[in-house]
Image (tube, rainbow, N blue to C red):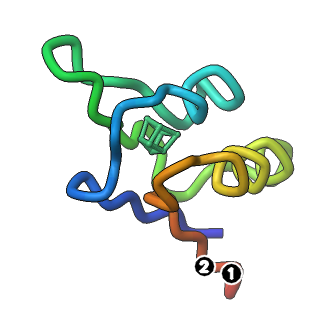
Amino acid sequence: MKVIVDEVKCCGAGQCVLIAPEVFDQREDDGIVILLDAEPPEQLHAVVREAATVCPAAAIELSETA
Ligand code: SF4
């Protein structure tokens, strides 16, 4: 799985960080998402999918090809 985040779309809601703190963080000054792990391990895929689903800005894109 590959994770791509779109900082322009991100509105800093922080849902992704609450759901998958191993993969997402937020910039301190404006809350915009920081991608910590662009290729998270198998055991995190379910939470990463959930984070992408709940992101209100649809700023998290997943590629499931790997
Ligand atoms: S849930 Fe979406 S909008 Fe909120 S911080 Fe994460 S990427 Fe940004």
Q: Residues within 10 Å of mark 2 (few under 14, many from 20)?
A: few
- x 55%, y 48%: residue: 56
- Which residue shows up at 41% across the image and 37% down it? 36
Q: Position of residue 46 (x, y in %)?
A: 85, 50
Q: Position of residue 40 (x, y in %)?
A: 62, 50
Where in the figure is residue 7, as x and y percent of width and height?
A: 25, 52
**Residue where numbered disc 2 is placed:** 63
Please provide percent x and percent y for residue 54: 69, 47
Look at the picture and state if 14 lies above or below 46. Answer: above
Query: Which residue type does callout 1 highlight?
Result: Ala
Which structural element holds mark 1?
A: loop
Judging depth in this view, the residue of 2 and 26 nearest the camera is: 26
Give the quadrant of residue 19. Answer: top right
Q: Is residue 49 left or right of residue 5?
A: right
What secondary structure is found at the residue carrying circle 2? strand
Q: Quadrant of residue 42?
A: bottom right
| The label number, if any, that marks residue 18 in the structure image | none
State the residue at coordinates (78%, 48%).
50
* Label 1 crowd bin: few (<14), some (14–19), many (20+), radius 10 Å: few
Q: CA distance from mark 1 to mark 2?
A: 8 Å
Labelled pair 1, 2 in contact (Cβ < 8 Å) = yes
In this figure, which residue is indicated by the disc labeled 1? 66
Q: Amino acid at mark 2?
A: Ser
Q: Eyeballing the image, is 62 above or below 21?
A: below
* Quadrant of the snapshot with the N terminus: bottom right
Question: Relative to 10, is 49 above or below?
Answer: below
Residue 66, picture quadrant: bottom right
